Amino acid sequence: MTTPTLSPDALAAGVSNLDHWSLRDGALARDFSFDGFPAAMAFMVRVGFAAEAAGHHPDWTNVYNKVSIRLNTHDAGGAVTQKDLELAAAIDLVA
């Protein structure tokens, strides 16, 4: 099943409702910084559970206390969809 894409207006509205997220290279992206590696890893574990519950998983990197997250929907051709906006909002709650 293919996830529907958002109109440009719906995408802009969705991104504007999220704090600190932006569109970068065709993905919804945000960088996080923590007090140290254990805090960054704890965040990633909590996000992992939220992502698994949503059935939608981020592309992310971690270097020491920094976590960078990119969200896009592969079954929508890599576009940012409602799934990404919802997962970004859930990640914000974890942060």
Image (cartoon, rainbow, N blue to C red):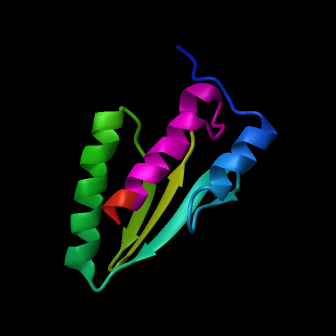
- Residue at the limit of the structure toward the top, as seen here: 1
Where is residue 27? Give x, y as percent. Answer: 63, 50
Where is residue 71? Give x, y as percent. Answer: 53, 48
90 displayed left or right of 74 = left
Where is residue 40? Give x, y as percent. Answer: 29, 72
Residue appearing at x 57%, y 23% in the figure: 3
Please give the count of numbered marks on the rendered protein.
Answer: 0
- Asked whether residue 38 is drawn in magenta, I would say no
90 displayed left or right of 49 = right
Q: Relative to the observer, which residue lies in front, 13 or 61?
A: 13
Q: Relative to the observer, which residue lies in front, 11 or 49?
A: 11
Residue appearing at x 77%, y 34% in the figure: 7
Residue appearing at x 35%, y 66% in the figure: 95
| Residue 60 sits above or below residue 41 on the image | above
Write down the region rendered in magenta.
Answer: 73-92
Q: Which corner quadrant of the image does residue 21 belong to? A: bottom right
Q: Relative to the observer, which residue lies in front, 83 or 68?
A: 83
Prevailing secondary structure class for the magenta stretch in the rendered image: helix
Residue appearing at x 50%, y 70% in the figure: 31
| Residue 94 sits above or below residue 52 on the image | below
| Residue 64 sits above or below residue 56 on the image | below
Where is residue 89? Give x, y as percent. Answer: 46, 52
| Residue 83 sits above or below residue 62 on the image | above
- Residue at the limit of the structure toward the bottom, as seen here: 35
28 displayed left or right of 48 = right
